[in-house]
Amino acid sequence: MKALLFFASVALAVATAVAAEAQGLPRGPGKWWTLEKYKLELKLTEEQSAQIEQIFQTSMERMRSEKADLDRAQDAFRQLLAKTDAEELEYMRAIDRVEMARYTMSKERTLMLVRIHKVLTPEQRTRLQAMHKRDDGNRNRAR
């Protein structure tokens, strides 16, 4: 259960950074391992921060490629929908390609989270989870 909560909290933080990075936007607060506040509170070493950044960058490269695959599969599916004479088997194959591309992206993102999880000590994971809960609570109160 703790691992699930950890993955959920890290996923939210990383998803923000992944979305911004994938769209070419400036990085948001999602790259917590680069923020002094997190480094200090988690007692994150420079080596750990660098390892997490490397994991993130490597995964981002893969996810950009996988996003392009997903976009191509979705475009092909839209084109197929525009056809009036397509067979159901064609739709099924196109749907399989779209869903496989989504799965591949999701799997890479989850593997990234697992790799980040392995860099942190159990104490750091617990602290990170608490920090995300606290920050989420502060964001909800600000709304």
Image: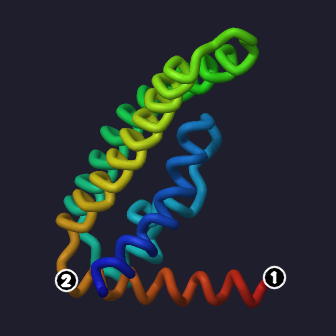
Mark 2 packing: few (<14 Cα in 10 Å), some, or many (20+)? few
Tag 2: amino acid: Pro
Q: Nearer the viewer, residue 21 or 49?
A: 21
Task: Provide the residue designation for mark 2.
Answer: 122
Left or right, 14 with respect to 62, comes to: right
Tag 1: amino acid: Arg
124 in relation to 12, above or below: below
Residue found at x 52% / y 31% = 95
x and y percent of residue 62 in the render?
36, 33
Task: Provide the residue designation for mark 1.
Answer: 143
List the single residue furthest toward the right: 143
Q: Quadrant of residue 40?
A: bottom left
For label 1, the SS is: loop
89 in relation to 116, above or below: above
Tell me the quadrant of the picture where the N terminus can be found. bottom left
Q: Tell me whether circle 1 and circle 2 mark residues in contact (CB < 8 Å).
A: no
Q: Quadrant of residue 58?
A: top left
Residue found at x 78% / y 85% = 142
Left or right, 119 with respect to 75, comes to: left
How far apart are the alpha carbons under marks 1 and 2?
32 Å
x and y percent of residue 55 in the render?
28, 48
For label 2, the SS is: helix
Residue found at x 62% / y 45% = 26
Q: Nearer the viewer, residue 37 or 138?
A: 138
11 in relation to 95, above or below: below
Left or right, 25 with respect to 115, comes to: right
Q: Nearer the viewer, residue 109 or 14?
A: 109
81 in relation to 70, above or below: above
Specify how the rendered protein is coloured.
Answer: rainbow
x and y percent of residue 68 in the render?
51, 24
